[in-house]
Amino acid sequence: MSNIFFQYMILFYLCFPIFVFLIGFINLSISVILMLLLLYVIYRLKISEIQCFHYRSIELLTILFVFLFLTGHGGFISASGIDIPWRNAIYQDLIKYPWPVIYEYSDSALVYYITYWLVPAGISSLVDLEGTDSYIVLFAWTYLGLTLFFLLICDYLKVKKNQMVVVCFIFLFWSGMNILGMLPKSIFAKTAFQIDAYNWFNTWLFTGGEYNGYPLNYFIRTTFDAVSNVYNQFIPVGIGTLLFLKFKDKIEYYAVIGLLVLPYSPLGFIGLLGLMLGMFAYQYKDIISDNGYKYLAKKVFSLPNICASVTILPVFYFYFTANLMAGNEKYSIFYVPLHEYGLMRVGLLLLYYLVYFGIYYFLIYENNKKDPLFWISGVLLLIFPFFRVGTGPDLNMNASMAPFIVVMLLVTKEILLAWDQKCFYGKQLFLIIALSIAMITPLMQITNSLRCCYLEGKRAVLLDPHNINGTLSDKTVKDFENFLSDKYKESVFYKYLSK
């Protein structure tokens, strides 16, 4: 893969689905104007500094391919992630129904983070693919994204030829040290650590349940769990995060990169936005002292930033707010009321901080204490558990993706530094041990998935306890308000922007 082809593939992967959304969902006259502005943004986005790595291509591509198979993606082997029935239903409905998707049964519109599926769904619809054939297209699209994500990691870390396989395994098996949280849970909670073929959570989720009627769901997804369940958000957020890190000194691209992620994951965008605001604050004083306010304003209000802000932002803001959950005001912004932070909850949060990133931070502190991303990511990971959007813990789970990816990169960089210096003792040795302990979690998740298939006597198992049955067309808004809106006709998007 040549460098220029690699660079265009990155832009294609993030931008083309947005173009498809504009063509398929927006009024033609409006969509033409928006697409012209976006084409200008792409033209101005200089990513020529990104290099494609050619080393060990076949081995690495095979590792990524096998890993994606093991996540159950596409339903070819292994058990599906617990969220997959909803993902499959959205994907199949995008294939079978005209866009925008309107359901007669519930008189509602499909309003969700659908951008990721538009290219594979569009291809499947155009060539009349159904069932397994359509999932082959989806698998290929996800495999391409996972590969680009990994290659961007290699570019950012400047990985050497003999280090790429190790970096690949760190990326694919990245996790917190959940087993350390499962040990005290096995003593004090009702459920102990076990290989659970159908639930998975008893293997790695040491938080969960309720206390005094309020939830205790604090966790960050492993790479395996993220690809298994929220691949449609995780992969674009990962690519966007690596693009930002590559160009963190170019404020004139901040809005462009951030808003390219927004259509795929509004909550993931919040995490990336937090990184951007942190870096902006860090650079602010130096920019002002060296170049003045006019220079700063010129960078912030660059033409690419402005064009992205007047195209992507309003379109997807109005689209997402057509969803009942997006504008629901009956839920507090706080995950639980502040008076609920007693000894038990605070103790659990401290354990969550320790096993997910606290131990890593202690071990990599010396070489990263002057890196602003080290501190910005840590602060974001500390504060996200206190807030929510809607009824569940989705904000923390998804907004944490970008800063947790930064932690992964910092840890990987530390491992590569020890490799180069042949220094495998002291904190570097303990870091390798910590990573080895962390990798137990995704290994257990894979074991659970394969055990489920063994017990069922099937090559692949779709876990569908809520009987989604591959479509949202026969579901009610009351039960599926996270995906459906029966007040869409009153929204700005469907009144003035949509077809």
Image (cartoon, grey):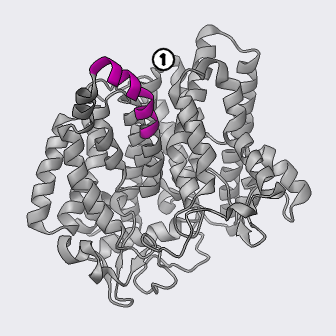
Q: Which residue, as the protein is rendered here, is positioned at the far right?
A: 187
Q: Is residue 115 magenta?
A: no
**Left or right, 27 with reference to 203:** left
- Which residue is depicted at the point 72% across and 33% down? 359
Q: Nearer the viewer, residue 83 or 329?
A: 329
Q: Is residue 318 left or right of residue 67?
A: left
- Magenta-drawn segment: 277-291
Q: Quadrant of residue 264?
A: bottom left
Neighbours of disc 1 within 10 Å: few (<14), some (14-19), many (20+): some
Type of amino acid at the residue the image marks with label 1: Lys
In the image, residue 302 above or below residue 156 = below
Say which of 342 and 432 sits in front.
342
Helix, strand or loop at disc 1?
Answer: loop
- Does residue 70 show up? yes
**Residue at coordinates 51% horizontally, 27% vertically from top-left?**
372
Q: Is residue 327 above or below residue 396?
A: below
Q: Position of residue 283 (x, y in %)?
A: 40, 27
Q: Is residue 286 magenta?
A: yes
Of the pair 309 and 201, the residue shown nearer to us: 309
Q: Residue furthest bottom?
A: 105
Q: Residue at x 22, y 59 (%)?
A: 20
Residue 166 in view (yes/no): no
Question: On the rendered image, what quadrant is the N terminus found in?
Answer: top left
- Main SS of the magenta part reads helix
Residue 422 versus residue 124 in the image, above or below: above
**For mark 1, what is the residue?**
160
| Quadrant the C terminus occupies | bottom left
Q: Residue 380's spot in the image, x, y percent?
A: 56, 43
